[in-house]
Structure formats: C-alpha cells, structure tokens
Image (tube, grey):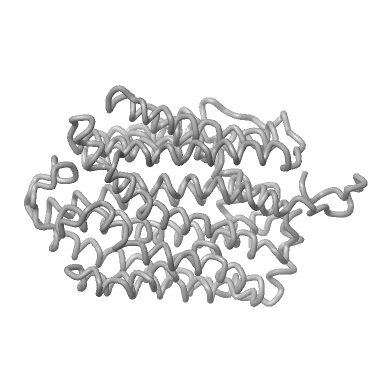
C-alpha cells in the first residue's frame, strides 16, 4: 500500500515519494464532481426547454445523479478493499467522463436521466476512494494540508460551475457536460501511470443483499423527499426493516465506526452544515434567474463570491489543523461564520451587491469546516476503516444536498401558495422573495445548531497530541 514501503521494498519504512502525483489525481476527481454538481443548477431551465419537459422530470434529472452516487458510496469502499483502491478509482474517471458525453447525445429526457444516474456511479467510485488514497500517500503531519489542498478543488469547481456554466449555457447546455470528458481522460492516464498499485483483499465481501437492501430503502426515500410525495416516503418506511435485516451479517457501516465517539459528531454536524452550504448555492442560482430576472451568466457572477472564498478557506483550514491540533475550535469557529453570514443574507435578497460580503464570509467559513471535518472524520477511523469513513461522510453530504434541494419547493408552496410545476423551466413570475427569505433563515440556523454539538464534544478534538496520535490511529481505531 502507498506509504507502507520504501523504494527498496522495506515495509517498515514509509514511502511517500508519489504523494504529489496522488494529490493531483484525487484533486482532479473532486474537481470533476464539483463542477458537475454546481453547473447543472444553471442549466435546468435550458434543458427543460430543450427536452420539452416539466419541472418534475428535470428534478429527477438533478436527483438521479445524487441517488446513484449516494447508494454506491459505501459499496465503493468495499470494492476498494477487495480489488485495491487504484483500479475502481480510475474506472470511476472513465465512467464519469463517458456518461457525461452520453448525456449530450441523449435523445430524450428519460435517457438523459439514465445517463445522469450512471454518471453518479462514476462519481461515487472516485469520491469514496480519493481521500483514503490521499491520506495513505502523505505522512500524518501533512495530511491536513493535503486534504485542504485537494478540497480546494471543490471550491474551484463550484466557482467554475457558475461562471463557465453560465457562459456556456447561454450558447448551448450540452457544453457543460463536455467539460468532463477531457478532464476524465487526463485523470485516468495520469493515475494509471503514477498511482502505486495496492494490495487487494479478495476476502472482503461485497454483499449483494446489503446493496439491494440499501437501495430499496434509499431510492423511495429520496424520490419521496424530492417530489414531496407521501406515498414514496411510506414505501421507504415499509422497506426499512428489510434494509436493517440485510445489515445483520456484514453491515455497510461497521459497528466500530458507528461507536467511535470522535467520528459521529463530525458526521452529524456535516449533515447539518451540508444542507446549508449547498442549499445557498442552489437557491440563489434559482432565485436570481426566476425572480430577479438575471441571465444564467449574470446569476453565475452573482453567486461567484461564495465559491471564490472557499478556494481560500479550504487550504487555510487544513494548515491551521496541522499547526494547532485544535480541531474542535476550528469546527465551531467555521460553523459560526457560515451560520451568521447566511442568516444575514435572508434580509438582503433584493440586492445582489449587498450579498457579496455575506457570501464571502459564508464560503470562507463553510470551506474551513469542510477540510477540517473531512480530515478529522476520515483520519480517526484508521487505515482499516478509512474507505468506510470516507464513504459515510460523502453519503451524509449527498443526503444533505438532496434534502436541501427538496425543501425549496416545500417552502415555495407554503409561503407563496403557488404551484411549482413549471417554475424552474419557464420562469412563470412567481414571487420567490418570501419563500426564499424563510428558506435562508433555516439554512443559517443549521450551522449554528451544528456548532453547539461540536462545542459540547470539543474536548475530544482540542488535544496538543492530535497530530502525533494520527500515526497510532493508522493501526488501531479509537472507540473512546
């Protein structure tokens, strides 16, 4: 495994000679996923008109990617254990790139949804295995910095999405998916040559019943939340016992991970913070186009300060964690910044100029939380559980994105009393100010609630020996 042998093959001396190559490839993987996650928000109206379809199908197009990614994140971790992390990680590049190309040539919206779901499978394989590959390639005292640099790709992608996407959509929406093709091919070739091959564990079990149980529970839940359909939610509740039964023998999330008192506070806070962080970008992209009448390019420029600040915040968060070891304090500080800034936006919605400073503060705080929480959450799991820990974090964050998207139509229906069927596509002129105002208040309150949770458990993180303890965590798992 990377980081376990020196150049002479001595397993007792770590070898980190390929660390920057691994960093480059994992950064490319996250860049692809970040661009695709944000760029599609601005393309929804244009795609709806192109396919002559309504908001229900376009919502399904958006969430199909999230459903397949979320469902395959944890199984991808087991696949990485069975076959080694390198091969499925690089396969994810190819799946992502060529499914993006297939969306461009989709004959109708149904095929576009299918290809979008396949694209999510590729994203799951890349995202689950990127952080474990990265952590195994860097010494313990540099892991925060490495994750911070790699996480910057999310900010760069989120910035490139609104700016480049807003420009390209003004010509044709197909161009936004073509971006993934050259990036995917370059990442595959670079990783094939330079990422060291890892030992595989053919005894690692990939339980089909586990995956099936997970899907039959998750898919109805996601559809029910996204479409506000009570029948799908009831179906998910009915299937919950089946899902639990499939987890008895070989659970998708090991008990040792669930009982780790350093891990679960990060997971819970990541869920609350994730709803807010991605919700802000989504709701403002919609609001600026449908209510303020901005073009896709103007809307992209208006939200750009948010991801631009994230580019600065992610490496700073990782650097501060490495230097101070004060993980709890950094998490609380970043959550307070994000929550307070988003709350202020709720009262400044009618002027894009007045939103610039709050967007910068929220993006800066949220990105510090992202890099610090990712490093802490995956690192405390130790090498044995890093795949699962990484997959769980991304599953939670994807679930938060689903909830954030699904809640907006609920707020529109409740606070405006208008049907949302054609809103995103045709711009029917519904006044979104009151619904978005209430929605932004919720998005600001969630990080503040999350900061209270971390503050209550801060003693588990604020220890001077945190950096030194990471080496020991590679071999054993703390369950406090």
Tally of numbered tags = 0
Q: Residue at x 51, y 49 (%)?
A: 31
Please identify the quarter of the rendering in which residue 177 is found.
top left
Q: Can I make out residue 469 in this image?
A: yes
Q: Foreground residue, 220 or 1?
A: 1
Q: Residue at x 52, y 31 (%)?
A: 95
- Residue 347 coordinates in the image, percent (x, y): 20, 73
Q: Foreground residue, 214 or 115?
A: 115
Please identify the quarter of the rendering in which residue 299 is found.
bottom left
- Residue 5 coordinates in the image, percent (x, y): 85, 48
Using residue 75 as the reference point, say whether residue 285 is left or right of it. left
Using residue 35 as the reference point, say whether residue 382 is left or right of it. right
Q: Residue at x 31, y 51 (%)?
A: 166
- Residue 476 coordinates in the image, percent (x, y): 73, 54
Please identify the quarter of the rendering in which residue 9 is found.
top right
- Residue 335 coordinates in the image, percent (x, y): 43, 70
Q: Residue at x 29, y 63 (%)?
A: 302
Q: Is residue 335 above or below residue 95?
A: below
Using residue 123 as the reference point, say whether residue 352 is left or right of it. left
Q: Is residue 415 above or below residue 224?
A: below
Residue at the front extreme?
171
- The quadrant of the rendering that contains the N terminus is top right
- The quadrant of the rendering that contains the C terminus is bottom right
Q: Can I make out residue 242 in this image?
A: no
């Amino acid at each position: 495994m990377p980081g376990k042998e020196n150049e002479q093959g001595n397993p007792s001396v770590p070898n980190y000679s390929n660390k920057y190559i691994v960093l480059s490839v994992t950064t490319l993987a996250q860049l692809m996923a970040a661009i695709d996650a944000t760029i599609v928000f601005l393309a929804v109206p244009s795609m709806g008109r192109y396919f002559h379809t309504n908001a229900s199908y376009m919502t399904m197009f958006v969430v199909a990617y999230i459903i397949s990614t979320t469902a395959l994140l944890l199984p991808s971790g087991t696949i990485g254990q069975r076959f080694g992390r390198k091969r499925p990680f690089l396969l994810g590049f190819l799946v992502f790139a060529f499914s993006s190309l297939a969306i461009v040539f989709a004959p109708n919206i149904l095929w576009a949804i299918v290809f979008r779901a396949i694209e999510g499978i590729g994203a799951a394989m890349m995202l689950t295995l990127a952080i474990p590959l990265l952590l195994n390639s860097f010494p313990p005292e540099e892991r925060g910095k490495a994750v911070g640099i790699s996480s910057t790709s999310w900010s760069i992608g989120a910035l490139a999405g609104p700016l480049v996407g807003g420009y390209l959509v003004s010509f044709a929406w197909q161009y936004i998916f073509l971006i993934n093709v050259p990036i995917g091919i370059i990442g595959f070739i670079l990783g094939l040559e330079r990422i060291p091959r890892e030992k595989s564990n053919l005894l690692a079990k990939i339980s089909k019943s586990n995956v099936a149980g997970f899907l039959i529970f998750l898919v109805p839940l996601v559809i029910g939340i996204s479409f506000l359909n009570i029948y799908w939610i009831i179906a998910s509740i009915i299937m919950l016992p089946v899902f639990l039964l499939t987890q008895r023998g070989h659970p998708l999330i090991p008990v040792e991970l669930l009982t780790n008192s350093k891990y679960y506070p990060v997971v819970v806070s990541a869920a609350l913070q994730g709803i807010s962080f991605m919700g802000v970008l989504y709701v403002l992209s919609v609001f600026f186009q449908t209510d303020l009448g901005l073009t896709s390019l103007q809307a992209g420029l208006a939200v750009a300060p948010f991801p631009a600040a994230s580019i600065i915040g992610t490496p700073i968060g990782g650097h501060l964690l490495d230097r101070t070891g004060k993980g709890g304090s950094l998490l609380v500080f970043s959550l307070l910044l994000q929550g307070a800034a988003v709350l202020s936006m709720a009262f400044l919605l009618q002027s894009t100029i007045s939103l610039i400073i709050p967007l910068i503060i929220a993006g800066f705080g949220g990105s510090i939380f992202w890099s610090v929480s990712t490093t802490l959450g995956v690192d405390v799991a130790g090498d044995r559980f890093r795949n699962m820990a990484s997959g769980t974090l991304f599953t939670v964050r994807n679930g938060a994105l689903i909830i954030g998207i699904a809640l907006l139509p609920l707020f529109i229906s409740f606070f405006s009393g208008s049907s949302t069927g054609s809103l995103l596509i045709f711009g029917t002129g519904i006044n979104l100010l009151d619904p978005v105002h209430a929605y932004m208040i919720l998005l600001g309150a969630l990080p503040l609630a999350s900061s209270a949770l971390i503050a209550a458990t801060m003693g588990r993180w604020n220890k001077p020996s945190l950096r030194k303890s990471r080496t020991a965590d590679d071999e054993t798992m703390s369950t406090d």
